[in-house]
Image (cartoon, rainbow, N blue to C red):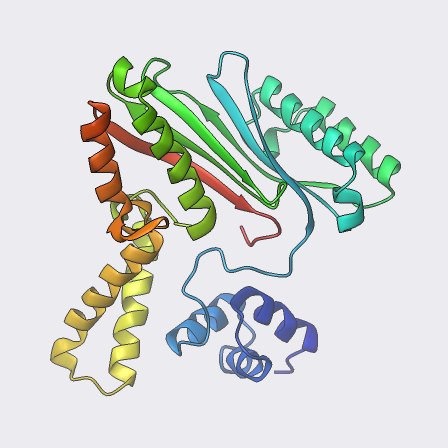
Amino acid sequence: MAISAQDVKQLREKTGAGLMDCKQALGETGGDFEKAIKHLREKGLAEAKVRSGREAKEGIITAVFSGDNRHAVLAEVNCETDFVSRTDKYREFVQNLAETLLSDGTDSLADVSEKARTLVREALATFGENIILRRLAHFSKSDPKMSVFQHYIHLGGRAGVIVEFFVQSDAARSSEHFLEFARNAALQIASMGPFSVSREDLPKKLQDEQKEIFAKQALDSGKPANIVDKIAAGKMDKFFQDYTLLEQKYVKDNTISVKQYLEDTEKKAGGKIVVKKFARFKLGEEQ
């Protein structure tokens, strides 16, 4: 079948692979994008990521919190040019939109209120550019007493993180050791882009697919069939170290893992600390 230049370009943006490799992958998979991505990953030509970056869109990522700090929203609002995104007027609009999403209790793009949609329509006319509420994450504390939110906005809104922690005791919750850990954990998530808190949180489908890819790579490289599973398991351990928060090397001290940093903080703060969940957005990144 004929493969268009546009299809090749889109696959390259999704995977980071070379143009000719993308064209060949599409040809060998009958133009099926998902199969082509998997084919490139098996060949080691595409990044092994769920959120492979594509061409960046402009805009802002922001985080807002309710007055009682029990609810929070992380939102990405896109525009067409960096010129618009850097204006105070655009930032004011994004802040207003995020606060509306928070007060409305919006959980997903499908539930956006008419009030919020009106704000976006008005922005289209104001800025003369296409304005899109691209994604949002809504947090509500499941335990108002134990839960603590921490957020981090990077580079003026080009990346953003909200993290929820469970902290066992009042003393630990107010401890400077915990507060420092919370700030550093948010920074870790923003800079290192984990997929989940732990390997147990990673979807089984993703784990099975990744292990299958590692096994095929081992077979294709000529490894004996009887050790392929062992090789794949070893590569999966490395995958977990790269893409789960607790197993990642701590960005400020790569001699320890985030889990070891957490355990040390628990001792100093005097109470159990659990990283419950997080959301991380990077501007224009593939969802």
Q: Residue at x 53, y 84 (%)?
A: 24
Can see residue 80? no
Front residue of 66 and 45: 66
Q: Is residue 120 above or below residue 17?
A: above
Nearest the eye: 193 or 12? 193
Q: Quadrant of residue 175?
A: top left
Return the residue nearer the eye: 197 or 42.
197
Relative horizontal placement of residue 112, taking residue 36 as reference (left or right): right
Q: Is residue 19 above or below residue 245?
A: below
Residue at left 73%, top 34%?
91
Where's residue 57, x and y in %?
68, 53
Whether residue 276 can be seen here: yes
Query: In the rendering, at what x and y percent does residue 201 appear?
Result: 30, 43
Q: Looking at the image, is 144 positioned above or below residue 217?
A: above
Task: State the image quarter where residue 271 is shown.
Answer: top left
Q: Residue at x 80, y 32 (%)?
A: 89
In this image, 84 relative to 95: left or right?
right
User: Does residue 64 sit above or below 283 in this rendering?
Assistant: above
Residue sitting at 55 percent across and 54 percent down?
286
Residue 41 pos. (x, y %)? 41, 72
Q: Quadrant of the N terminus?
A: bottom right
- Locate residue 154, reporting x and y percent: 56, 43
> Looking at this rendering, what residue extends furthest in the bottom direction?
222
